[in-house]
């Protein structure tokens, strides 16, 4: 294993600086996640102003972002293995922020669709570059915690979007008089404000984060592997990667499904208004999500300290199991308070799979392939999790139960099926993952 065989790297960054770099990346990720979620909260205002149908808004929310995000992640991952990752990520952060601001400058379906495509392309730089950078900024023992902190940005972003997004929308409801633009509708002002704010982490990254020296280079592969070497690695580890990628994708199908349909559940079944739900779920869901992200790394380290070399995959597995059980029961609760409590408590496990799935890829993949292998994983979960999950729950509500007010049953059914399939795949892949770890053959630090 890398922990046992690799000598200390005298070129490594100081721990304090490494955590600072991660903080800047998390700051960028926080704005990126806000950019994804804010469209949902602004949908009623956009429809009221521009008259878009639900189908059109669905395309702007999901299709425009997810498809192009997934398509561009592969070439960006390939580039991250060859070129300066900090520059790529800085450029991507600036791109998605400017396109988010651009959403506030257009007033047509085609214009909004195009701007969301740009957001997706910019955000495609995030995970491949970050996964590779964390591998070089942190020692193996600290990486699970680093990936947990990184994932915490999504939980923090979710909480702030729900709690303060509504307040910002209320503040701008009557329109805003903006420099150079004059009076603009409130929903456009929100896009512009959030988009321009996202340039702050881009500037911090450009001027304060240095590209770290690459380490853990595989002995039997070139510094810039060919596509033949890439496919050989994927083929050699195909069982591990299939179980890992698709197992997490199934788990995230359930997660993305209920996250997108929770407001409708509380509205249709429990009679809560969207602002009422947003505030309470933002507080408790965000809090437990942060705890989940931070704790995931400590759980993985605990497994490894117990001699379980597959600790990161075990954390993914138990997170999937706990999440599936909790979020299958939650929508069936008879009162909104119990429903919210069960979803919040299940949130303890919500970030274990996505955080430690990245750590698992990092542990088994040589540096010169991490961006590419991570991008394949992002492609699978992007299309499978973010794309299929919300659609599956809506389809089951319409075609299995045939009643919008039966949405709690469709959420429970899709969650138990998808979550169970994902957890079983992860469990089946544990042996293959351990075998993949035995093939790790990093060069000694400082060699070329």
Image (cartoon, grey):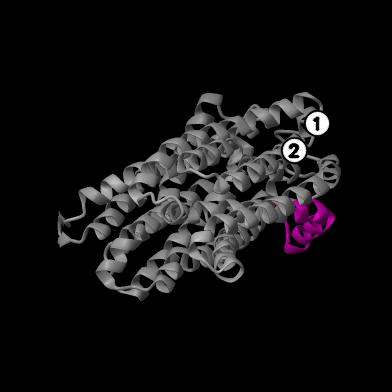
- Numbered disc 1: secondary structure: loop
| Picture coordinates of residue 122, whole percent (x, y) | 46, 58
Q: Position of residue 400 (x, y in %)?
A: 61, 68
Location of residue 24 with respect to 237 vertically, above or below: above
Above or below, 79 against 427 in this view is below
Q: Residue at x 38, y 54 (%)?
A: 38
The residue pinned by badge 2 equals: 314
Residue under the point 36% across and 69% down? 112
Magenta span dominant secondary structure? helix
Q: Position of residue 207 (x, y in %)?
A: 40, 40
Mark 2 secondary-structure assignment: helix
Closest to the observer: 389 or 22? 389
What residue span does the magenta drawing correspond to? 223-243
Q: CA distance from mark 1 to mark 2?
A: 9 Å
**Is 228 left or right of 377, judged from the image as shown?**
right
Is 7 drawn above or below residue 259 in the view shown?
Answer: above
Image check: 143 left or right of 177?
right
Q: Is residue 235 magenta?
A: yes
Tag 1 and tag 2, C-beta contact below 8 Å? yes
- Residue 368 or 403: which is nearer the viewer? 403
- Residue 224 appears in the figure: no
Q: Tell me what residue is drawn at x 44 percent, y 44 percent.
A: 158
The residue wearing badge 1 is 308
> In which quadrant is the N terminus drawn?
top right
Labels 1 and 2: the sequence-earlier one:
1
Q: Quadrant of residue 378?
A: bottom right
């Amino acid at each position: 294993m890398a922990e046992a065989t690799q000598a200390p790297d005298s070129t490594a960054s100081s721990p304090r600086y490494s955590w600072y770099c991660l903080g800047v990346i998390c700051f960028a990720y926080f704005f990126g996640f806000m950019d994804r979620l804010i469209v949902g909260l602004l949908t009623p205002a956009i429809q009221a102003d521009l008259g878009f149908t639900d189908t059109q808004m669905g395309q702007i929310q999901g299709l425009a972002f997810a498809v192009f995000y997934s398509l561009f992640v592969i070439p960006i991952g390939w580039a991250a293995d060859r070129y300066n990752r900090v520059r790529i990520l800085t450029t991507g952060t600036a791109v998605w922020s400017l396109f988010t601001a651009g959403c506030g400058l257009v007033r047509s379906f085609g214009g909004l669709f195009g701007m969301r495509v740009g957001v997706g392309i910019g955000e495609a730089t995030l995970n491949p570059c970050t996964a590779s950078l964390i591998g070089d900024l942190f020692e193996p023992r600290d990486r699970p915690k680093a990936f947990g902190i990184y994932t915490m940005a999504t939980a923090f972003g979710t909480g702030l979007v729900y709690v303060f997004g509504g307040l910002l929308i209320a503040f701008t409801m009557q329109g805003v008089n903006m420099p150079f633009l004059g009076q603009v509708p409130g929903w456009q002002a929100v896009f512009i404000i959030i988009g321009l704010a996202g340039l702050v982490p881009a500037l911090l990254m450009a001027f304060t984060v240095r590209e770290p020296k690459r380490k853990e280079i595989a002995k039997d592969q070139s510094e810039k592997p060919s596509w033949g070497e890439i496919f050989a690695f994927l083929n050699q580890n195909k069982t591990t990667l299939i179980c890992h990628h698709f197992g997490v994708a199934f788990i995230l199908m359930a997660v993305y499904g209920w996250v997108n349909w929770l407001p409708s559940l509380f509205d249709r079944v429990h009679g809560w208004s969207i602002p009422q739900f947003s505030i309470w779920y933002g507080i408790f869901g965000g809090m437990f999500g942060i705890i989940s992200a931070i704790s995931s790394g400590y759980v993985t380290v605990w497994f490894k300290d117990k001699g379980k070399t597959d600790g990161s995959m075990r954390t993914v597995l138990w997170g999937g199991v706990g999440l599936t059980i909790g979020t299958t029961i939650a929508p069936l609760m008879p009162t909104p308070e119990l429903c919210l409590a069960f979803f919040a408590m299940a949130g303890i496990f919500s970030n274990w799979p996505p955080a430690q799935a990245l750590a698992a890829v990092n542990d088994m993949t040589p540096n010169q392939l991490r961006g590419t292998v991570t991008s394949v994983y992002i492609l699978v979960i992007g299309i499978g999790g973010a794309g299929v999950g919300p659609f599956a729950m809506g389809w089951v509500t319409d075609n299995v139960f045939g009643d919008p007010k039966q949405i709690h049953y469709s959420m429970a059914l899709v969650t138990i099926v998808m979550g169970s399939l994902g957890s079983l795949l992860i469990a089946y892949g544990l042996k293959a993952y351990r075998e993949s770890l035995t093939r790790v053959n990093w060069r000694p630090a400082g060699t070329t």
